[in-house]
Amino acid sequence: MNVLSIKAIELLKSLILTPSLSREEQHTAVILQKALEDEGIPTYRKGNNVWAKSKYWEEEKAVILLNSHHDTVKPNPGWKREPFKPTLEGDTLYGLGSNDAGGPLVSLWATFLHFYDKEDLPFKLLFAATAEEEISGPNGVASILEDLGKIDLGIIGEPTQMHLAIAEKGLMVIDCETKGKAGHAARNEGVNAIYKAMEDIEWFQNYRYEKESPLLGPIKMSVTQIQAGSQHNVVPASCTFVVDVRTNECYSNKEVAEIIQKHVDCEVKARSFRLNSSGISEDHPVVKKAIAMGRKTYGSPTLSDQALIPYTTVKIGPGDSARSHTADEYIHLYEIEEGIRLYIELLDGLKLD
């Protein structure tokens, strides 16, 4: 194993050892800032976001952002190992955030170190370790976009088995309320809001949008929460429910909300329109190079910080998305070593024009 890989793995162990739940990433931000400064690299920090620029910053060159997050979800009750203890068993490193997205993060960090002081690059590099990705929070990558400036390409580190996600589904959460009329359950009184809501819920379950994406498939709507009634003998006057909507690139989130409102009787309120689907052209130089390297392309059903970055981005990283948010989360050391090697190969000589 080479020096870069060893350094990356040691950094990952330090990150696992340090709790960094969303909004509470201040301690891992310190670790990441120190990891850069120990390599002689000047850093910038805003909140719990840390970033750095390559040594030779020539204004006329394109900017490539290497970005991943250092926040994690809360460990679920199924953990048999200690989630905040980096446990190495053979070639497998266990620990919360090891796969999502510690492995991709430290692999991008090592890649940045590799290119940091090279003078003849056809691009400038930014490395950013950001916060609040797991909650798409306002104090994550969105809070430093103005500081980073214009970006020509973003490489977003998430566990993809080092294949290239060239499209990603968006997310919109809908709060719905169906109104009825209260009455006594023993008599034929009132209008039952639950029964009225059932009609709309059936629509959410069965409706198919006209446009389907060749990469992302159809829009998926799932009713995930419901609440109504206060006691057994009162016909409920209100029924509220929540719908998780995963959008494709064929519609904006706002367009989807307008279609929903036309078809249902309940009141509909989107919590946000900002997490739209994202994608990159298959003719983009980075996609062509990844394919030439033997990497597969696909559409990702899961959300990342791509949704918050208003520039061309791709999602690629070591690890497996299926392990994310699971008990006894892990990553293989060979995946990190391969991730660094493939990131370097992908960027080596890459020209964006």
Image (spheres, grey):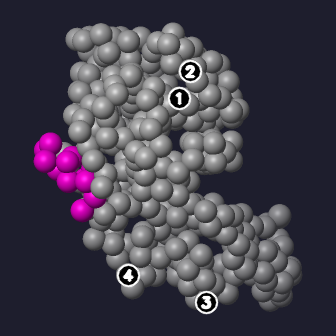
Which residue occupies the foreground of this view, 49 or 270? 49
User: How many residues crowd mark 4 within 10 Å: few (<14), some (14–19), many (20+)?
Assistant: few
Q: In the figure, 305 relative to 101: above or below?
A: below
* Residue ID at (79%, 83%): 180
Pointers 4 and 3 in contact (CB under 8 A)? no
Q: Main secondary structure of the magenta part?
A: helix
Count of labels in the image: 4
Q: Earlier in the sequence, mark 1 or mark 2?
A: 2
Question: SS of the residue at dot 1?
Answer: strand
Residue receiving disc 4: 211
8 vs 297, left or right, is right
Q: Position of residue 45 (x, y in %)?
A: 65, 29
Name the amino acid, label 2.
Pro
Residue 308 percent across, percent down from the top left: 56, 54
Quarter of the image for the N terminus: give it.
top left
Say which residue appears at 31% left-offset and 51% top-offset.
352
Q: Give amino acid for label 3.
A: Lys
Tags 1 and 2 touching, CB below 8 Å: yes
What residue type is disc 4 on?
Lys
Start-end of magenta stretch: 283-294
- Residue 52's disc is 1
Q: Earlier in the sequence, mark 4 or mark 1?
A: 1
Which of the marked residues, 1 or 3, is nearer the chain's N terminus?
1
Is residue 314 rendered magenta in the image?
Answer: no
Q: Is residue 331 visible?
A: no
CA separation in Å, label 1 and label 2: 6 Å
Residue under the image location 32 percent in, 35 percent down: 121
